Amino acid sequence: MIMDGNGRWAKRRHLPRAVGHQRGVESVRRLVRAVRGMGLECLTLYAFSSENWKRPQDEISDLMGLLRRFIKGDLPEFIANGVRLKIIGDYKALEPDIVHMLDDAIERTRNGSVTLVVALNYGAQQEIARAAQLAAQEGPVTVESISRHLDTADLPQLDLLIRTSGEVRLSNFLLWQAAYAEMYFTDVLWPDFTPGHLDEALAAFAGRERRFGGR
Ligand code: FPP
C-alpha cells in the first residue's frame, strides 16, 4: 500500500495536515484488523520514505509521534491477533527510542501468522544498492543473490501494489519486488480507504490474467 492523500484529505476540510495523518493511522488500524479475515498473508505499508526527510520538521515529528503511539497502543492487539510486525528500510537511523520500541515489538510478535510490514526510512533504490553491495561480496551478482539480500528476502512475492489518492507512480517503493506485481490505483484518499476498498482491489486483482512474461 502506498498510503497517499492524507494532506489533501485534511486540506479539503480546512484541517491541519497532522489531522490527515491521524486519520491515516485510523485507516491503517481498520485494515490491519481486517486482513486476517480476508485471507491475506502479508500487508506492506509505505509509512515513511527516505525522501520524506525533506518535509518540514514539525510534520516529521508528527509522523514519528504517530508511529510511537501506533506501536505502543496497538502492540497488545497485534499479539492477541497473531500479527507479526516486520520493518523494511533503514529504520535503525530513526530516533533511538523508536528503534528500541520497534525491535521490542518485532521480537514480541515473532510468532504471528499474518505479517504487517511497515516501510520506514525506506527507499527501493537504496535497498537495491545495499543488497547489490552485499551480493558482490559473496561472488557473482545475480538476480537471485540480490533478491536474497533485499529487506523483503523472507517475505512472499509482491502480488498487488495499491496506491491511493490518484497519483500514478511508485515513488521509490518496492521497485525490484514490483517486477511482476499487479498495480491498482484509486482516487480514494488514504484516510477514506476502508477494508471495503481493499476488497474491491482484491476483486480487480482476481480478474487479472498474470503471465509473468510467458503466454
Ligand atoms: C501521504 O500523505 C502519507 C504519508 C507521507 C505518510 C503515511 C503515514 C501514515 C498513514 C501515518 C503513519 C503510519 C503508521 C503506520 C503509524 P501526504 O501527506 O503525502 O498527502 P498529500 O499528498 O495529500 O499531501
Image (cartoon, rainbow, N blue to C red):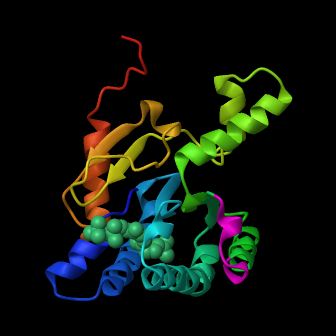
Main SS of the magenta segment? Answer: helix
1, above or below 161, in the image: below
20, above or below 91, in the image: below
Q: Which residues are magenta?
A: 90-98
Q: Is residue 194 visible?
A: no
Q: Decide if residue 120 is on the left or right side of residue 20.
A: right
**Quarter of the figure with residue 115:** bottom right
Depth order, front residue of 211/119: 119
Q: Residue at x 74, y 71 (%)?
A: 103
Quadrant showing the C terminus = top left
Depth order, front residue of 207/89: 89
Number of callouts in the render? 0
Quadrant showing the N terminus = bottom left
Give percent across and percent down for residue 176. 53, 36
Q: Is residue 134 visible?
A: yes
Q: Decide if residue 15 is on the left or right side of residue 92.
A: left
User: Which quadrant of the picture is home to ligand 1?
Assistant: bottom left
